[in-house]
Image (cartoon, rainbow, N blue to C red):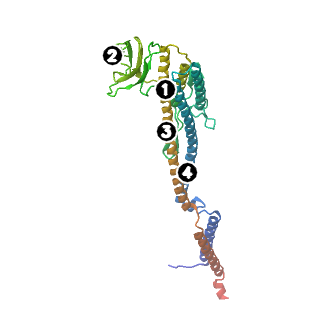
Amino acid sequence: MNNRISTGMMFSQSLASMTLRQKQLTTLQQQLASGQKLVTAKDDPVAAGTAVGLDRALAELERFGKNAVTVANRLGLQENLLAQAGSNMARVNDLTIQANNGSLTADDRASIAAELRAIHDGLLSLANSTDGAGRYLFGGSADDSAPFGKTAGGVAYNGDQTQRRVEIAPETFVNDATPGSEIFMRVRTGDGTVQALADTGNGGTGVLIDYGRSTGGGWNGESYTVVFTGPDTYDVLDGLGANVGTGTWNSGEDISHGGVRLRIEGEPVAGDSFAIGPAPNRDVFATLRNLIDTLESNPVTPAEKTVQQNALQAAMRDVARASENMIDARAAGGAQLAAIDDATSMREANGVTMQATLSDLRDLDYAEAITRYRMETTALQTAQTVFARMQGMSLFDLLR
């Protein structure tokens, strides 16, 4: 077998070597000019694919960050507004205690009622606050119109009960602002579980001091009514009006039946009644309105004054429940803000890791690239020199 080295083959090999060196130099020049190791995806398909995936992940982190800023702003506003509303309710409690002083005149109570009316309107204004972007804070998902409005019967809620969940990190969600229905409207009365009220038609001076579930338990959620049959005797009626118990009573003693108890002081008369049962919901605006109506009444007889005192006692309990409800809403919002802070730290840590990985994949090592550039330049110059010398190598030159 003959292996011949032809002049054409030598020229082709030299040309291919120079072309390869020039291509590598061009790639290195592009890398040095851009500072990027991956000029095109074909430079390293695997690394390029990984880098694209990391770019998408970083874009997701940026989107989560924007979500977190938006919801943190709304929750921060909710915190401020509920703190202000809580201060208003504390003032209502102080005014109610003040109004329960028997030495006050009708004018004194009217002044307190006027301040309570101003607090009522201020609280309504707080409930209709926006988030600075034109969206109502306490309207749930129906946040394009004011959630609360005055009606002939009081205040109506026009929003919904939807509480948005916002993703602030991969698989990490927080709740948006609490719907106003849960803060201002669905407020438990009484002690939060049981409510007791004196009948407004009572003719004696029996004042409902305290009530609740009996320490022994056993209450099944049924309602009862204590009806006095004399100054120191009573009957207990169930929800259907059937007599289920009787007893004797002294002022300041508990009357217990069916797992609930009442403590009454004063001098009830025959026919006076006190009802106890599950605590219903009532909106805070109705509580304030009832309190204002009570203070604007002008009791004259001892029985009328007792009715007012019982109403004020009930109002203090209902105001306390409304305040607790707002505190619970603030606590829930605070927990969401803490979760946002934790998610922010996690996003920042993940972002740093991803950026470092991207840098390893894409960023050029200038020292290495310059060294390679010089080596390729030298190799190209060598190939050019060899090619130039090959042009003078011919058998015809030897024959001459």
> Residue 53's spot in the image, x, y percent?
53, 53
Q: Quadrant of residue 227?
A: top left
Alpha carbon distance from label 2 to label 4? 78 Å
Pinpoint residue 99: horizontal percent, then vertical percent: 53, 24
Q: For the view shown, which residue lies furthest in the front direction?
A: 103
Query: Nearer the viewer's eye, disc 3 or disc 4?
Result: 3
Of label 2 and label 4, which has the lower sequence position? 4
Q: Which of marks 2 and 3 is nearer the N terminus?
A: 2
Mark 1: few/some/many CA within 10 Å (<14, 14-19, 20+)? many
Counting residues from the start of the chain, the first of labels 3 and 1 encountered is: 1
Q: Work out whether mark 1 precedes mark 4 in sequence or the reverse, and give the earlier one.
A: 4
Q: Mark 2 points at which residue?
A: 248
CA gap between label 3 and label 4 equals 35 Å
Numbered disc 2: secondary structure:
strand
Tell me where residue 388 appears, x and y as whole percent.
Answer: 66, 79
Q: How crowded is mark 3: few (under 14 residues within 10 Å), some or many (20 or more)?
A: few
Residue bearing the label numbered 4? 56
Q: Is mark 1 on a helix, strand or loop?
A: helix
3D distance between C-alphas at marks 3 and 1: 22 Å
Report which residue position mark 1 lands on. 316
Residue 367 in sight: yes
What residue sits right under mark 3 in the picture?
Answer: 331
Mark-to-mark CA distance, 1 and 4: 56 Å
The three-letter amino acid code for the residue at tag 1 is Met
Mark 1 to mark 2: distance in Å? 29 Å
From the image, state whether disc 3 or disc 1 is nearer to you: 1
User: What kind of residue is marked 3?
Assistant: Ala
Determine the residue positioned at 55% across, 44% down: 68
Which residue shows up at 55% across the image and 20% down it?
Answer: 295
CB atoms of marks 2 and 4 within 8 Å: no
Mark 2 residue type: Thr
